[in-house]
Image (cartoon, grey):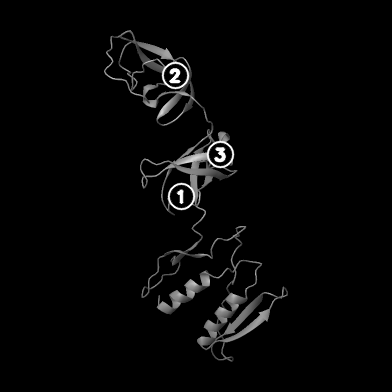
């Protein structure tokens, strides 16, 4: 790919050639490029008055040739208010390289707003609605929780994976970049002043507590279950001392000694 071709492509992809808009800018640029290489150009105005078609020929008029047809517009992808002109997000073609048929040379689009795509299991999707907040975690930003909100939910799921695709919109000030991977936690319910126990201390609806120097099995009613903690609705009080992780091999009534207390 020569420098001239790269520059032509870079200029063309930056022109807002959306269907239904005036296309005079792209017609003029294409016409100039064709005429600079000896082509003959005829511009045919459209019935709209602000759009036109372009017909170009190369070579002798009395010699049969090939007909090539192309579009000067793109499928609409309007935002209510563009914050910037479309531009190249990534350029894979370098000057001097030979571009193979079907090769992607440029990634074009707006950098904001960013959208995260997540697959949600079918048993969880009924609890997800547009507008819900979500917390994201990324290996690129360890120890940080990043904000997002559910933007859309696909109405049809994947029958093989039994998942539904959920798109989450990120705020403009997010540190995440295009192509990064994240763990998504959608907030389906918020409980204030909740009693929490470590997730690793819970086995289904059972926990083991230390009472009077002995291990006692307790049944709990669990609420929200997270990766780090489980909400306890009933069955324990704040004074309970939970043995964590869950001691599967410790028999009920066994003598135990508290070495230290730790909050979840």
Please rate how many residues cluster around mark 2, counting C-alpha atoms within 10 Å: few if below 14, some from 14 to 19, many from 20: few
Residue at image x 55%, y 70%?
Answer: 15
**For residue 31, what is the image quadrant?**
bottom right
Residue on which disc 1 sits? 174
Label annotation for residue 205 = 2
Nearest to the eye among marks 2 and 1: give it: 1
List x then y, in percent, for residue 133: 53, 39
Q: Nearer the viewer, mark 3 or mark 2?
A: 3
Which residue occupies the foreground of this view, 138 or 144?
A: 144
Q: What residue did someone put label 3 on?
A: 132
Q: Is residue 59 visible?
A: yes
Which numbered disc flags the more N-terminal residue, 2 or 1?
1
- Relative image position of residue 130 (x, y in whole percent): 59, 41
Q: Earlier in the sequence, mark 1 or mark 3?
A: 3
The residue nearer to you, when weighing 167 against 258, is 258
Residue 26: assigned label: none
Is the Cβ of the residue at disc 2 closer than 8 Å to that at disc 1?
no
- Residue at the image position 53 percent from the left and 63 percent from the top: 84
Quick check: marks 3 and 2 in contact, CB under 8 Å? no
Q: Is residue 141 above or below residue 242?
A: below
Residue 185 place in picture, x, y as percent? 47, 38
């Amino acid at each position: 790919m020569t420098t001239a071709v790269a520059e032509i492509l870079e200029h063309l992809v930056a022109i807002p050639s959306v269907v239904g808009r005036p296309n005079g800018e792209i017609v003029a640029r294409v016409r100039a490029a064709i005429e600079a290489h000896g082509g003959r150009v005829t511009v045919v105005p459209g019935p709209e008055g602000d759009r036109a078609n372009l017909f170009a020929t190369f070579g002798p008029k009395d010699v049969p040739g090939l007909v090539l047809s192309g579009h000067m517009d793109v499928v609409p992808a309007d935002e209510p208010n563009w914050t910037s002109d479309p531009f190249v997000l990534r350029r894979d073609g370098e000057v001097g390289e030979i571009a193979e048929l079907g090769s992607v040379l440029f990634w074009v689009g707006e950098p904001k707003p960013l959208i995260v795509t997540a697959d949600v299991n079918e048993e969880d999707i009924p609890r997800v609605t547009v507008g819900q907040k979500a917390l994201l975690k990324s290996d690129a930003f360890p120890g940080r929780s990043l904000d997002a909100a559910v933007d859309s939910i696909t109405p049809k799921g994947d029958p093989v994976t039994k998942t539904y695709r959920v798109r989450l919109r990120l705020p403009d000030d997010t540190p995440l970049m295009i192509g990064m991977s994240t763990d998504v936690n959608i907030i389906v319910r918020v409980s204030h002043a909740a009693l929490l126990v470590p997730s690793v201390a819970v086995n289904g609806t059972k926990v083991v507590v230390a009472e009077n120097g002995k291990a006692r099995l307790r049944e709990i009613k669990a609420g929200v279950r997270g990766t780090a903690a489980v909400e306890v609705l009933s069955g324990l009080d704040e004074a309970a001392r939970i043995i964590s992780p869950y001691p599967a091999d410790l028999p009920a009534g066994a003598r135990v000694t508290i070495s230290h207390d730790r909050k979840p």
